[in-house]
Image (cartoon, grey):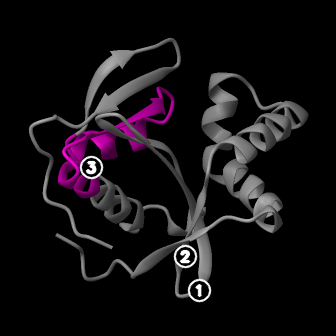
Amino acid sequence: MARPDVPHWRLRKITAADFEWAFELHKAAMGEYVERTWGWDEDFQRQFFADAFERQPRQVIQVAGQDVGVLVTDERHGDLYLGLIELLPAWQGRGLGTDILRWLIRRAADAGKTLSLHVLKTNVRAAALYQREGLRVVDSEEVKLLMRTSPSGARTAPSA
């Protein structure tokens, strides 16, 4: 159920003009985990981000017209894959990410799909959130965990 203190959010398509903002968001949201996993090389990370920016359709998460995060999803056969959810640090820990995750779980379940994602092992806070919301570790890779909802149904989640 939606928490009354979580603001209403919406999604908009990302544009090329959002690139620098999105890269800075990526550094703020994921830099610590990337640094602990592989080390942060600015040039490499910028190129890696630019390649993914062009390949993966992204959406900007907005609250009251303010850009506060980025979401990447991929509809796959039998699966909705959460490729990325990043929020500005000021929006982390306020229930917004949980609300979006619940919406995605509901969207997947309504389509008869599972929701799956990869999370860096160093990002224990995110992994704990995903577990609280019903995702389970189904595979452990060198630096990431693959997590998935059960195919028989996920928790009830609010719609956006």
Residue drawn at the location 84% of the way across and 41% of the way down: 46
Q: Residue at x 61, y 67 (%)?
A: 13
Residue 32 location, quadrant: top right
Marks 3 and 1, how far apart in space? 26 Å
Label 2: how many residues lie within 10 Å, few (<14), some (14-19) or many (20+)?
A: some
Helix, strand or loop at label 3? It is: helix
Quick one: quadrant of the C terminus? bottom left
Quadrant showing the N terminus: bottom left
Which residue corresponds to mark 2? Answer: 62
Q: Name which of mark 3 and mark 1 comes first in the sequence.
A: 1
The residue at which mark 3 appears reads as 108
Residue 143 point in image, percent of width and height: 53, 18
Mark 3 Cα within 10 Å, few/some/many (few <14, many 20+)?
A: many
Of residues 143 and 48, the one drawn nearer to the viewer in this rendering:
48
Q: Which residues are magenta?
A: 105-134
Asked if the residues shown at circle 2 and circle 3 are in contact, with their CB atoms under 8 angstroms apart, the answer is: no
Amino acid type shown at disc 1: Gly
